Amino acid sequence: GAPELNAEFRYLAARGKELGRDVIVRSNLTSLLEPGQEDTAQFFADQKLHVIASLPCYSAKNVNMQRGKGVFDKSIHALLVLNSLGYGKEEGLKLDLVYNPLGGFLPPPQVPLAEKYKEELLEHFGIEFNQLFTMTNMPIKRFVDFLYRRYDIL
């Protein structure tokens, strides 16, 4: 998802912060690089929004296979922008990542996968983040259609 693309997003996020609420934004990362969104990451930081970003793998091959050609590079670029603003490094600027497997199976255990993500992203790109969450896909619409096509469900 990309709630930051909603015309009312900034207003709603800022009002939530004014009310003393923790505001979490679930980002697909690439939306931060869309035309007209060049200052969105700075808005996140100014408002101290908690960013939870989808990154289905730490390898380009797997991300591009799941999300499309070039998505991995854009995601890495967006993560570097967030890191440059203090996300994943400074108190109050939380950057968490989400892993969900492609296909009808469960993700691997969260703790060792988080360690591998941290190691790979730091070593290869200098990227830091706070936590990794693993999730499973719920088989609705596009995902269930995908499973039917692959005969994973009948």
Image (cartoon, rainbow, N blue to C red):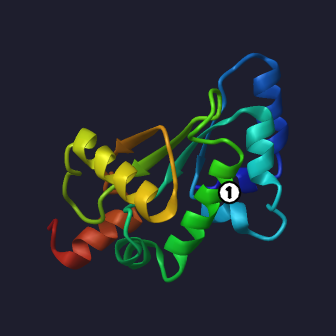
Q: Who's the residue at 63% across and 42% down the image? A: 87
Which image quadrant: the N terminus? bottom right
63 horizontally vs 29: left or right = left
In the rendered image, is residue 23 in sight? yes
Task: Please say whether residue 6 is visible from this viewpoint.
Answer: no
Residue at figure coordinates x 21%, y 61% from the top left: 104
Looking at the picture, does residue 24 appear above or below residue 106?
A: above
Q: Is residue 2 above or below residue 15?
A: below
Q: Residue at x 46, y 73 (%)?
A: 67
Q: Nearer the viewer, residue 137 or 55?
A: 55
> Amino acid type of disc 1?
Val
Quadrant in which the C terminus appears:
bottom left
How crowded pointer 1 is (Cα within 10 Å; few <14, some 14-19, many 20+) is rated as some
User: Of all residues shown, which one is farthest toward the top?
Assistant: 20
Residue 142: image x %, image y %?
40, 67
60 left or right, relative to 10: left
Report which residue position mark 1 lands on. 81
Query: Where's residue 37, x and y in %?
Result: 79, 61
Name the residue located 44 percent from the left edge and 65 percent from the top edge: 124
